Amino acid sequence: MFKLTPRLKPNYTFSDWIAALNIFQKNPIDSYEKEFANKFQNYYGVMFQHGRTGLYALLKVWELENDEVICPAYTCVVVPNAIVLSGNIPVFVDSSKESFNMNLELLEKTITEKTKAIVVTHIFGYPMDVVKVQEIVKNAEQKYGHKIYVIQDAAHSYGAKWQEKLVTKYGDAAIFGSNISKVINSIFGGMVSTNSKETYEKLKSWRKSNSKASGFSKSIKRFIYFVAVNIAFNSYVYGFVNWLERIGALDRFVKYFEEDKIYFPTDWDMMPSSIEARVGRNQLKKYNYIMENRIKNAKNWINKLQDEECQFMQDMQGSTYSHCVALVENRDEWLEKYRNEGIQLGILIEYSIPYMKAYESYKRGEYPVSLEYSKKSINFPNWV
């Protein structure tokens, strides 16, 4: 085995160890929710075990059932999983050729009288035109005579801005994931932020009524996982970890989807634990430092590779580069070349959801741009 720089790595420092071990911290979940919401300029925050749990809860508290929920064809599969498992119908929109995000013209054409919600994903930290989305939704609401909820999917876009305003200031709610692959993380966990007191109160009530208790044993397991992550992502250890991953020995721990199944992880409906909130609070304090350096590192990669045979999307004002992603023709060769140089490149979303076996019945037409991105995208490590 050899030294290998991993494709992703959480920003864990000594202060995170202190936070993880500080069992005397009072009401860390409540504090984390308030601090998180304030950081991203919303009034309220509700922590869940996963970001997908938060999306599921939103659709439930808004009483959507057998309704159409629009989302990108090129996004993390946990988004349509939550839509289907909540009893609703995912409707996919192809990507733009100028962005990894949804094509706005296609979005407008996709809305029908059955549309009740839209998941606006700002993938890889590239912001969508939220002003245009709001205009499209307003026109559709007037046309069909009912409310259409707008959910900002900010799992990849902590702090992304459109016209110098946070994208999380728009719409009815925003969802965040905060596992180890995200900009900041709380070991596991997710967050919903909103400016609606009614939605906030309903979410708190839903979580209380539908979540399994988070006991002391869960905190112990989360701490063990925290320790394991700190060890595993050390460059001198990661070569061995990556070898185990490549032969499938770690699928139980790292694989989050299957081509033919729509499902949630077994802990999806558990209450978040105090240790997760404590680490999340500490991560939030480091957010500005983490973000500044991720953006700087991403731009260093872009400048370094500008003459190579890879295509980066145009740098947009307000992008946060949760991942530094390019399109390449010969992805396997790139992976092997950099692995031999001691750097692991990532394939973050290697599928276009409507073409997955589990979602074939939801496919409406073709999604060529999304399919192309799924075959050509590759990401360079830009963690701090």
Image (tube, rainbow, N blue to C red):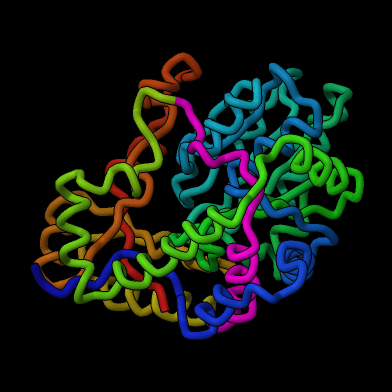
* Picture quadrant where residue 355 is located: top left
* Picture quadrant where residue 323 is located: bottom left
* In the foreground, 3 or 105: 3
Let me know if residue 286 is in the magenta part. Answer: yes
Q: Which residues are magenta?
A: 262-289
Describe residue 162's horizontal placement relative to residue 85 as left or right.
right
* Position above or below: 162 against 303: above
Taking the view exactly as shown, the residue that stands out farthest to the front is 216
> Could you tell me if residue 104 is visible in this image?
no
Measuring from the top left, give residue 120's x and y in whole percent. 63, 44
* Picture quadrant where residue 257 is located: top left
| Residue at screen point 36% across, 23% down | 260
Q: Indicate the quadrant containing the N terminus: top left, top right, bottom left or bottom right.
A: bottom left
Q: Indicate the quadrant containing the C terminus: top left, top right, bottom left or bottom right.
A: bottom left
Measuring from the top left, give residue 23's x and y in whole percent. 64, 73
* In the foreground, 22 or 119: 22
* In the foreground, 31 or 259: 31
* Position above or below: 277 against 359: below
Measuring from the top left, give residue 141's x and y in whole percent. 84, 30
| Residue at screen point 17% across, 50% down | 246
| Residue at screen point 65% across, 28% down | 69
